[in-house]
Image (cartoon, grey):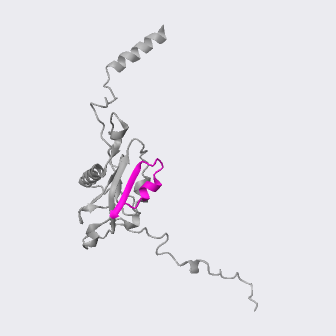
Amino acid sequence: MIGTLRALLTTLKTTLRRPVTAQYPRERMPLQPRYMGFPGLIWDDKVNESACTGCLACARICPTECITVAMKDNPLFKDGKSPRRKIVDHYKLDIANCIVCGLCVEVCNFDAIVMTDQHERGGPSRGGLVIDIDTLHKWGTEYVARMRVQGIEPSTGSPPWERPGYKPPQAAGVGAAPASAATEAKPEAKGETQSK
């Protein structure tokens, strides 16, 4: 009987408390700045073309084979306006199969892919879950702009030494005595003689 009363008291206490669960479709919790959603493509504003060259590195590394990409000759390279000889012709991402692992970002040699915060995509058919190149450029461009407004430079997978503002770490013991001085022979004890 006492146990039942305690349980009822606990229930009454929780009815007066504010709910902690967000009702998802109507309420959305704020995402963390480095939240990793579906990948997006970077647009190179300097040349006004995609940063992607269609090299297939992302398609080869993808464990679920959800990326389809092809390249073509870049007409802007022939005119001398672009440093890229090849450019992406078409790029498709099947988000039904994407596991958001980020391997495509890490393997990209041209920093053309970024993990965006897009995650609320769905549809009534699997065919509607294949995202085209224009949408991927839109996702990437919008994400980079939002992050820069917050003062965060989005990571595109490039190694730290290739990122702007990188300062190499100081070697341990900078300013310490050279290693050769530390390994010098110790002075001989009193009374010992040196024989040659």
Number of residue marks: 0
Question: Is 171 rendered above or below residue 152?
Answer: below
Residue 129 percent coordinates (x, y) = 35, 41
Residue 109 percent coordinates (x, y) = 40, 63
Q: Residue furthest right?
A: 195
In the shown orientation, is residue 185 left or right of residue 90? right
Q: Residue at x 41, y 45 (%)?
A: 98
Quarter that holds the C terminus: bottom right
- The foreground one among 37 and 77 is 77
Residue 137 percent coordinates (x, y) = 28, 53
Q: Residue at x 33, y 69 (%)?
A: 85
Q: Is residue 143 visible?
A: yes
Q: Residue at x 74, y 88 (%)?
A: 194
Q: Residue furthest top?
A: 1
- The foreground one among 185 and 2 is 2
Q: Please tell me whether residue 155 belongs to the stretch shown in magenta.
A: no
Question: Is 51 rendered above or below residue 129?
Answer: below
Q: Is residue 53 visible?
A: no
Quadrant of res 31: top left
Quadrant of res 42: bottom left
Q: Please tell me whether residue 56 belongs to the stretch shown in magenta.
A: yes
Residue 190 percent coordinates (x, y) = 71, 83
In the shown orientation, is residue 82 left or right of residue 35? left
- The foreground one among 60 and 120 is 60
Question: Is 73 rendered above or below residue 97?
Answer: below
Q: Residue at x 40, y 60 (%)?
A: 108
Residue range highlighted in magenta: 54-72
